Amino acid sequence: LDMSQLVMSACSPSSSDEQVQSALFDTLGESERALEVMFDIVPRAKDIGRLVTEDTIKAVAIERGDLPRLASSGAFGTIAASRGPGGRGVDVEAERLELLRQEAIDAANEAAFAQAAATAVGGTSAHATHSVVRESDRHAQKLAKKAAKRAAVAVKAAKDAGAIVDEREISQLVLGGQAQLDYEAEWGQHTMGLDGMSPHETREMLMNLKPEGTKEYFEKKTLPSGTEREYGDGYEVVTIPPPRLDLAALPPRIVLADAMPNSHRKAFAGTESLNPMQSQVYDTAYNTQENILVCAPTGAGKTNVAMLTVVAHLRDKGIIENEDDPYAAYAHIGTENNGQGGGGTGVTVSQAGRKIVYIAPMKALAQEVVEKFSSKLKALNIVVKELTGDMQLTRAEADRADILVTTPEKWDVVTRKGGDGSLSQTCGLLIIDEVHLLADERGAVIESLVARVHRLVESSQRQVRILGLSATLPNYKDVARFLHVDESRGLFYFGPEYRPVPLQQQYVGVTEIKDRFRREKKMNDVCYDIVTDALQRGHQVMVFVHSRRGTGETARALADIATKEGVLDSVFRTQGKEGPAGDAYTKYVDRANKSRSKELQEHFGNGMGIHHAGMLRNDRKLTEQMFSDGAIKVLCCTATLAWGVNLPAHTVVVKGTEVYNPEKGGNVDLSILDVMQIFGRAGRPQFDKSGEATLITTHDALARYLDKLVRDVPIESTFIKHLADHLNAEVVGGTVTTLQEAVEWLTYTYLYVRMCKNPLSYGVNADQRDQDPQLRGRSLELVRDAAKLLDERRMLRFDPASGNLAVTDLGRVASHFYIRAESVATFNEMLDNAPDPSDADLIHIICCAEEFENVKVRPEELGEVDKLKKECCPLTVRAPVEEFSGKCCVLLQAYISRFKVNSFTLISDTNYIASNAGRVARALFEMCLKRGAASAAVKLLRIAKSVDHRIWWFLTPLRHFEAELPGNVFKALESRKLGEQAGYDSFEAAISLLDMLPKEVGQLCHWNRGGDKIYRFASYLPRLEMSCNVQPVTRGILRFQVHLKPVFEWHGRWHGGAEGFWLLVEDGENNRIYHHEYVLFPRRTHPESMDLELSIPAFDPLPPQYYLRAISDSWVSCEMLLPVSFKHVLLPSRQMPYTDLFDLTPLPTTALQEPNYEHLYSKFPTFNPIQTQLFHVLYHTDTPVLLGAPTGSGKTIVAELGLLRMKRVNPRAKCVYIAPLKSLARERLKEWKSRLGAAPLNWSVLELSGDTRHDSRALNKADVLVCTPEKWDLITRGWRGNSNDFAESPASTGKKFIREVGLLIIDEIHLLGEERGAVLEAIVSRTRLISKFIEQEKGKGSEDDKFEATRIIGLSTALANPYDLADWIGINVDGHSVDAKRGLYNFRPSVRPIPMEVHIQGFPGRHYCPRMATMNKPCYAAIKEHSAKKPVIIFVASRRQTRLTALDLISYAAGDENPSAFLGCPDAYVESITSTITDASLRHTLSFGIGLHHAGLTSSDRETVEKMFLNGDIQVLVATATLAWGVNLPAHLVIVKGTEFFDGKTHRYVDYPVTDVLQMMGRAGRPQFDTEGIAVVMVAEGKKIFYKKFLYEPFPVESCLGERMMENINAEIAIGTINSIVEAVGYLSWTFFARRVKMNPSFYGANSDSEEDVEDFFFQTVKNTMKALGDNG
């Protein structure tokens, strides 16, 4: 009665619906019965409040017997007295109060007993959001709740009437007072507060507190209003109604015609206006460059949001028309890099950031996106391309594409190989679909990608916009923070009410838990009921299961039940039906019957289909089309369909939630995100007004899923599990070089975001969090553990002391080929245990990769696997087929053998294995290349190519043309070759066909009329003609001069744009690779040959031969082998005569004893140790001098001392200074004009070069002549004066002053071995000849006694063969007399006035430009480490590289928040200087303290840069290599960035001479400022060992006169020096060439070093030269 009164008061006519509901909740509670009553009352609440009165309720109560009929009106008023039988009055009020008190006691007792019973059977917590228990548990809990409600109402009624004063009276009487004790105990337990907490609990509580002042709305979430719970036979159903959308709160829909230009609307064809979700995002997506995260349910229209950002990006980049700014498309003109110096191809300024990259979670979805975007953007002429494992693009195709659609893993591989010219540099908009996959196993890849983008943005200062598309996420703010999204402008969250089709959800819990078969049957029954109900209402159904086999089993179970119920034909089948379904059946019946899949045919007949990854792609496509067109009504599929293909249905059923997790070795629950993704397929926006989704699970799992619906469980990071692999990738990419940089990189990941929010989940306790709020310590611990792991696996080198991380070959290969660290560990162990593995061993190693660990071995497949092993495995299977490696090995060999596999699960596994095996084999091939394992590397390349083409390497390579030739041709060619014993001569057999006539070929191949065709195809097989000339350089180095000529016919269809070959130099005896190189023959130069010079190590004694092997990179079996014999190779004798530097007291400059001379050296008081040691020979004798010393040793002053000696002895004599390089000559001219040409000496210093012309009077008056070799060669040709026929020629002036030359200084004489060395050799040889002639004239009594032989001073770096050079310039090197070797000084490379520390760093990469780009970060790191405040010179190969290097250095400095780090002067000063600069790039870089120096600058710009660098206004100078010779600009740190340059003659990159590298390094160390210099030499990885050897061990100088013999002999004949063959042989005896032939005969082709053989060699050389001159007229 009282409850009725309360309900009546709650239903007040003046109350709103919300107030009524709230009051009823307070009155009735939240039990299921209460909800049922409330659902009946609420719709009639106003009628109840208006019509029901207190009297009405009383009358009903009396009628039911709930109150005595004598009760008066008013439940709480005084009851009228009545008279008893005796006429005595009764105290009715007292009786009523007693009755109410007793009712309260009884109700309280009943409630206590019910609660005790419920507790005994295991009730749930009162704080649970919902409860799902056993039937008995549920019944007890229900009774307890009802009893408690009744007790509460009764006690309240008694208390209000005054029958009970204190509620504790009741508790004392109930269950003997036990309830009171329990109540007090429970109350005390819950009110202990902080005093009751342990210290650990207190810290945990404090750690989770929000900052002071934080205001956060909290709402206890429960299942949505309207949720219904029903019970069936063995199951429980919870139905959640669709959420209601408040239409009034939605933003107005944006009409596209009003919002964007007509041209842009073409991308939204068929769409008039944006839906509410899209309209809300429109302004940010289309009108700003903000990063965006959109969280919305599946089907809400996120694709159009992506399209808005795509169109905005295309508009802003000028790719499509911009009506607001018509000139935007031309904005990039004038900013492109026109100077492609070095022949490289890179990303221009206009290309940078122009592409859009769309990352889809699966390849199937990528294909769908490509189709959708291509159709929408076709009208705008936008090119959309797929870049996945299935779809490889050429570089040209990728460059042409405006949008690339890819998968996370593929884009990760692309960006790992970043650098100049890479696709990652072209990305300006990155769209990440399904970003909530961060919680998935693949989420680590997305974290790595986004972190890489963020770091690129900061380092390059170039924006890359990110759009994240996601399903609804509980912690979307964390994801936004990870994506660098501004929460106020770029974060959009839309709830389930934004679905275009409202979704009703059902969760079914099956109670048959123990018996798996009964449970499966019950699930099938429930599924059948749901499917049948939907079909009868005219809807299609998708049933999702979690195994491939489960799709077929579920379809058969539904068909069996329908057959039993007799509704299969009427409800399921479409055959023979009228309308669209019947028409669709007729359309597809033939195609279905032709399918190879019997299951597809079977289920199609029942109106159903199956879909899973194990099916053939054509069958999957057919099934999708049949379901889309209505030919089948039910589709049983795996969850991949929910992610991959947009194929919705009205009703979706998820049957079962147990998913096998191989890592945990058991089943786990399907994640709630996956459930929501599958549910998103329910409801077709174009056709349905609602959708239905049902999850069928076990009863115990039902509670967990309902709990996840109402309790927001944030998605966590899985990055820690994959940290080692991704750290290795960053180290390889050069973005992380130390542990501190690794910690900084980690802060860009989602892992760091979540670690800060939820530290306990990532191993951070409260104490750690208190001490380190930023969690840098935990981050350091994580990266250090990963670095140690990688170091153990040899994937990087980790120095714990310094924290430095250095890349290794193994780590580089693993990163580039996407190989897991676990696989690398496996490969290391197996290769170490098999030093010479067989083919079977290697294919077993491939199949042991961790990449294949998820290939399951299913019992039902073993029979077919055993059959395959017997029938199609030519190689031995090393592992049992019950193991995954054994199964993989069998399936891989079956794939290569093209054997038919019947089981669809095996077909799927085979495709998976084949798609990965080639990549793994290539990785192993490169690992073995780095190891130098010749046999294993060759075999692995064969395996990789066999996987790619499905052709065994022991079969004929003509199988590449299988589509063009009949099978009997191959059988005939392979008839004698069977299995592993066939050998590797199939290529030779195929090529031998070219030695026959086409008719004979046809007869041999049993195809008489096809002989011509076979012959033509044989001529297409790529092959090279190889020759090799061996020249011993030292006893440890051989020079291989390799000639490669392609001798095959080029056909565009078969060869494409280029053919690549691997060139290997092998030692067959030791199974070692000493050199490997990838050579490319482009179509445009075919059939031009290629010449290579290789430096190959040699060992004493020499083996009989090495092998030169060329292997086609793509054609199976195409291999060439050339034995390189060492039978006639003689290694040169060991020469390493160094001059010791004596510990002498530095000689003062006053030792010159001539004030005018001393004035030249007034800036320093003493000569350096080298100059001191040579002083006597230079200044007091006329002995020829050869000085070999490192750059920077003061060799110029040595030359000046010789010059001063000459002038002191013979003032009329002239000095000729010859510089091999024009830049060096100009530097010396400039210096000597200022010093020697000024007072007090006032000598005449003239330049003789091709750019100058002087008359004979000026030449005769000159004191010093600075010449280039060619100019002096031309002049000295007229030394005899026999030039009657050439009176006006420059040579005729030679006789005027040549004989007056008293000193010939040849700088950098070691350049004899370079291209212009023959000219130097001719000059010196002719000079000595002239000197001899003059001496002879003088001996005959010449009147002029002042003429003497010309003294020669040669200046060089340290030499390996100084005796030959010394003997050649006239130094006596024979014997052991006092004068022997006088004038020969060959100091060690380490002898420098300023010691130099050298670092040699190797960098990978086959291509020049990307390799140069990877060097920029190490350049910046070297500057910071070695020369933070001191001057730095960086030498590069081209003008373009100067600019790119400088720009990257500026970016890295800006990334460190110090963009002016290299500027050493005020901004105002540098601005005034830059205003005078002509070159735009130089103006830009100078403002950041970095100068450029190359030949493309004007002379004034170069002088300005040099001056600023010398003054310290700029710290860094990036220069081309010519600066090393031309300008004397020393620095503390010198970086040689690359040792190659582009040779325009050969159209390829060639190495600098070692002398050039030494010259560049010599600029390190400033004499007056530094105590040491530092040089960092960055080289290609393969050349690191070479430079390590020869930067410290001098390289021998060889003569190149033999290559220019004709020109030199002809010149001497023309001037009369040579008149016969005998005189020609005599002339050769004066040359350096003659001395080197005797010392190293094999290098020049002489038989031996005996006098007889050398004489014969000279005679034959002269004879051949004369004949060639005669033949050429």
Image (tube, helix red, strand yellow):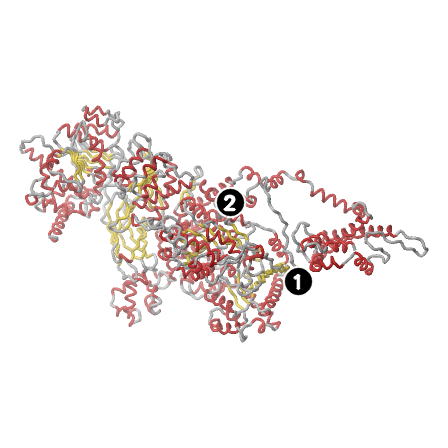
Please provide percent x and percent y for residue 978. Answer: 36, 64
Q: Nearer the viewer, residue 1525 or 827?
A: 1525
Please name the residue shown 90% across and 52% down the image. Answer: 90
Q: Is residue 947 visible?
A: no
**Residue 35 image-quadrant placement:** bottom right
Q: Mark 1 is on which residue type?
A: Gly
**For the residues marked 2 and 1, what is the alpha-carbon distance in whole angstroms?**
46 Å
Q: Mark 2 — residue? A: 752
Mark 2 surroundings: few (<14), some (14-19) or many (≥20) residues within 10 A: many
**Residue 667 image-quadrant placement:** bottom right
Q: Mark 1 — residue? A: 234
Question: Helix, strand, or loop for circle 1?
Answer: loop
Q: Nearer the viewer, residue 1293 or 547?
A: 1293
Please provide percent x and percent y for residue 1265. Answer: 16, 36
Question: Helix, strand, or loop for circle 2?
Answer: helix
Is the residue under label 1 in contact with that under label 2 (CB below 8 Å)? no
Q: Nearer the viewer, mark 2 or mark 1?
A: 2
Q: Nearer the viewer, residue 1444 or 306?
A: 306
Q: Mark 2 is on which residue type?
A: Tyr
Badge 2 or badge 1: first in the primary sequence: 1
Q: Is residue 249 visible?
A: yes
Q: Nearer the viewer, residue 1327 or 681?
A: 681
